[in-house]
Amino acid sequence: MARFALYGMIILAVLTALWVGLRRIAWEGAYRRVGIVIPAQELTGASSDRELRQYLHKLQAHGVVAISVELTDFPHWGLQRTSFDRDLGRVIQLARAVGLQVAIVADAHITKLPEELRALRPKFIVLISDPPGEPIQIADLLSDALVGIVEFSEPSGLQELYRHGEKNFVRVHAIKSQELDRLSLEGALARWERAVHERTIRLLWVTEHQRFPQYLERLSLRITQVGMELGEPSTPAPFESFSWVYLAIGAGFVSLALLVLMGRLSLTVLLGCGVGGVSALVLVGMWDVELARQALALLIAAVVPWLLLWVSTERFLGWKLVVIVSLCSIVAGLAAAAVLSDLSYFLKINEFRGVKLALVAPSVLIVLAELWRWRGLSWRYLLAKRGAWLIPALGLGMLFFVLERSGNLPAIPVARWEELLRERLEDWLIARPRFKEFLVGHPALMLWRREPSLVHLGLLALGALGQASIINTFVHLHTPLVLSLWRTINGLVLGLLIGLTARFALAGIQQWRRRS
């Protein structure tokens, strides 16, 4: 009877995660309008009002919705503080006449708008923090303007504004001058496209817009080709997060853990764990809801891959193991995303904390669990094979590499050949699968065998890394959910193909060695 109750709680958690996922897909489908902003200072110097008016109409046809006025120097973008002279006034007047809005671009320390700009009622206030993380000081400037947050240059304090009722945010992307030098036209267009398609960017601040021939024309075409609309981005629709979602998915997580541990622990210990787990969920949720959601999502990301592998490796091998565990990891990823789903995460005002821990914890846990299973074996037996000591060393090296390469600004930069490979995968597959899945985790799990050796222990740990990466994909909530699903499925299919190829190759090598 208890087992059926636990299965019921797991099914309820899965249905809850799917319901939240469908709501999120509907929200993302309605939030698809993308606008372009260009600096007003790049339009000054036109020979006549007629030529400038014609040029502004042309810009408007290519998706430009506003011209920006910079209130400070931005050397990384090749812009100086805007000079409030007659020429600027003429540009703004003609831009407003053809229907373009005004955007203010300022650093995080701005506290007051100049009166001439306040009278224009700017539609956007774009904030840049350089370096990222400077405290924001714009409480009296918000009014009804959309607050644009430049990606990778976000100020601190946005969460406080959100909690106090400010919901008029829009994510902005911009490319710095030195990056334009490196990217060229095609590289810049591809980067704009990825920002819009993959990261809920809805405002593009295009500086040096005359640098390439047909820059804005080709950019607007790329935006529409990925299914977006050109126009003034709207205020994001609200997306509520319900407390019962947190409780249902939390109860499902506790039930999964109890089912996996059933038969391995005594009934008294299991009962205590169940009561303690549910009580902890309720108490932490009553104390701090946001902390409780973060903690539950982290537990799902860090523990569920280990639980899935621990129980599945007793029954399955090869491609069946990879497919079954990966599908369950997708459901776990949807559950973790459902716990965190609200507007602040979609706009990256809030984000999942503990990415590095969630990536490495499943591998560490599965290694400890396997060593516990082998507790009757001696280390002499495990190290009997030549070169077996290399496995722990390689494992630690891989762990360090994964930690240093995770995040938006990794300590170990991406090599140029890897950038090119990523771009080709995006062109071919729409959603680029993660290397940790299709090139490492899934093939390693395909090669794993149920035998006590450090080689197969290392393969199992790499397989756990692939499953952790799947869940990590879904807790990037600023990425559209459908894209995350495509990314994971592409990784699963490619991983199975590479794993099968590796198995046939190893089988051929073994036959050749026996003949020799």
Image (cartoon, rainbow, N blue to C red):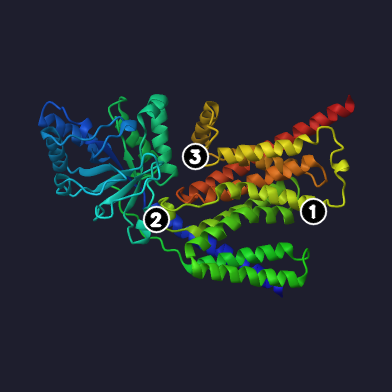
The CA distance from mark 1 to mark 2 is 43 Å
Q: Which mark is residue 372?
A: 1
Q: Looking at the image, do the residues carrying marks 3 and 1 touch, with CB atoms under 8 Å apart?
A: no
Q: Nearer the viewer, residue 7 or 300?
A: 300
Label placed on residue 159: 2
Q: Nearer the viewer, residue 8 or 175?
A: 175
Distance Cα–Cα, label 3 vs label 1:
42 Å
| Residue receiving disc 3 | 430
Residue nearer the viewer, 232 or 353: 353
Q: Is residue 353 above or below residue 393?
A: below
User: Which residue corresponds to the image point at 75% horizontal and 53% vertical from the top-left?
Assistant: 369
Q: Is residue 294 left or right of residue 207?
A: right
User: Of all residues shown, which one is farthest toward the bottom?
Assistant: 1
Proximity of marks 1 and 2: CB atoms separated by less than 8 Å: no
Mark 2 is on which residue type? Gln
| 41 lies above or below 5 | above
Q: Earlier in the sequence, mark 3 or mark 2?
A: 2
- SS at mark 3 in the image: loop
Tag 1's secondary structure? helix
Residue pictured at 42% horizontal, 33% vertical: 190
Q: Position of residue 421 (x, y in %)?
A: 54, 30
Pointer 1 local density, CA inside 10 Å: few below 14, some 14–19, many at least 20 = few
Rate crowding at label 3 as few (under 14), some (14 to 19) or many (20 or more) other CA atoms within 10 Å.
some
Could you say where residue 405 lies in the image, as x and y percent from the top left? Answer: 56, 38
Identify the mark nearer the N-term, 1 or 2.
2
Q: Amino acid at mark 3?
A: Ile
